[in-house]
Amino acid sequence: MAKHPVVIYGASGYTGMLIMDWLIDQNIPFTAVARNAKRVQEMMAQRVVRLESATYEIVESEHTVDALTRVFKGAKVVCNTVGPFVKFGLTTVEAALKAGCHHIDTTGEQGYIRAVREQFGEAYRQAGLLVSPSTAYMYTFAEIAAELALETPGVDVLETATLCRGPRFAASGVTIGSTASIFELLRAEQCYLWEKRLVPHALGASANVVDPSFVQPVFSIPWGGTSLPVTFEQDGRVRCCTSWVGFYDNNVMQLVHGLVQKWETEYKHLPKEQQDAVIKGIVDSTTPAMPPRERTTVTRTADFAIGRGQLAAVRATVHGITPYISTGALHAAAVMKLLDGETNRVGFASASKAFGHRYLLGFLEQRGLARATVTPL
């Protein structure tokens, strides 16, 4: 049973420890949960800022519904960072519900998000609890931009892009968990929203995204479709939503794009066990170790939404830094609202819809992590 109001599940991972940083900054006690308590303790001592001033406990747990339910009981909010979520996420969602906790996580894996909505959304609503996937830089920044665009009357079509410039993908600029999630997308359906229906992208879909923040067009791909088409599928304001993701390293992005096509031709029809081995090999060769903490002078982002209506047109952009650190900040912002009992939604909802995009943007702006601009077109 948790002694403290917030549980961080996946506490030995890179993102879990960044969430701890922000909870400590806000003086919020937490329970750190992982499979190996000794590893958590060692990693926290090395990487968590201001740990000496924190109130926390470390708890070891197996990844089963029953074990996690016992650990979560007594808490109010579970912050889940254990991925790939399409493999491990639903177990944690079910356990949090049984323990009577709100559940927020960090992923944009479309298949997982749709499963959460369909299998648990109504149960969470009836329990008066929030389940909010994809509370993270990716794709909350893009959703904030989309919500800013939707403030223009008449906008009903959205095109969004998530663009990041920083350490090269192959040089351990991405965490192990993120890399595993990225390559799990190889075997997942990738959908965009078209006339209120989720429609699969064509095989090999890509776009050269032009943004004034970058000199060259950024080669971008659907990245699993992102969470935004699912988020806006049941939003009466939005008819269509397409999302793209690109790192400002076109060679690397084209390599990832090539892996998608290679998967279709060489691996798609293999048994799942062999597919798992292929993905593990890619992850191990791409991200061999936990990356260093992000540098604000290196890792920069530009997320934008172009909103169109019959005559309306607007572009909203959120410029940011340090995506993983910003993810920790977003979790702290969400936790603060949930502990105070202040949420606009219960059941299945994105962070922007649950807490308000202006609140999240203000939290980020006040801490020097983001700024927004809105330009009529």
Image (cartoon, rainbow, N blue to C red):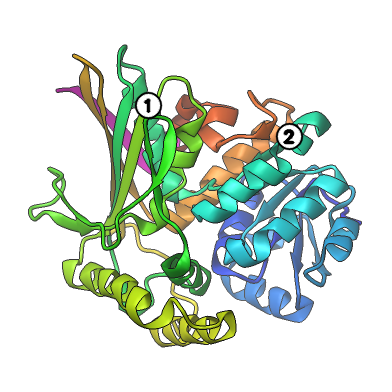
Q: Which residue is mark 2?
A: 122
Q: Position of residue 225 (x, y in %)?
A: 40, 51
Magenta span has 374?
A: yes
On screen, residue 97 versus residue 347, left or right, reads right
On screen, residue 110 versus residue 37, left or right, reads left
As shown in the figure, which amino acid type bears the numbered disc 1? Arg
How busy is the neighbourhood of tag 1: few (under 14 within 10 Å), some, or many (20 plus)?
A: many
Magenta span has 196?
A: no
How busy is the neighbourhood of tag 2: few (under 14 within 10 Å), some, or many (20 plus)?
A: some
Q: Which residue is mark 1?
A: 239
Asked where in the image residue 315 lies, by quadrant, the reply is top left
As shown in the figure, which amino acid type bears the numbered disc 2? Glu
The C terminus lies in which quarter of the figure?
Answer: top left
Asked where in the image residue 35 lies, by quadrant, the reply is bottom right
Residue in the image at 44% along x and 73% along y:
292
> Helix, strand or loop at disc 2?
helix
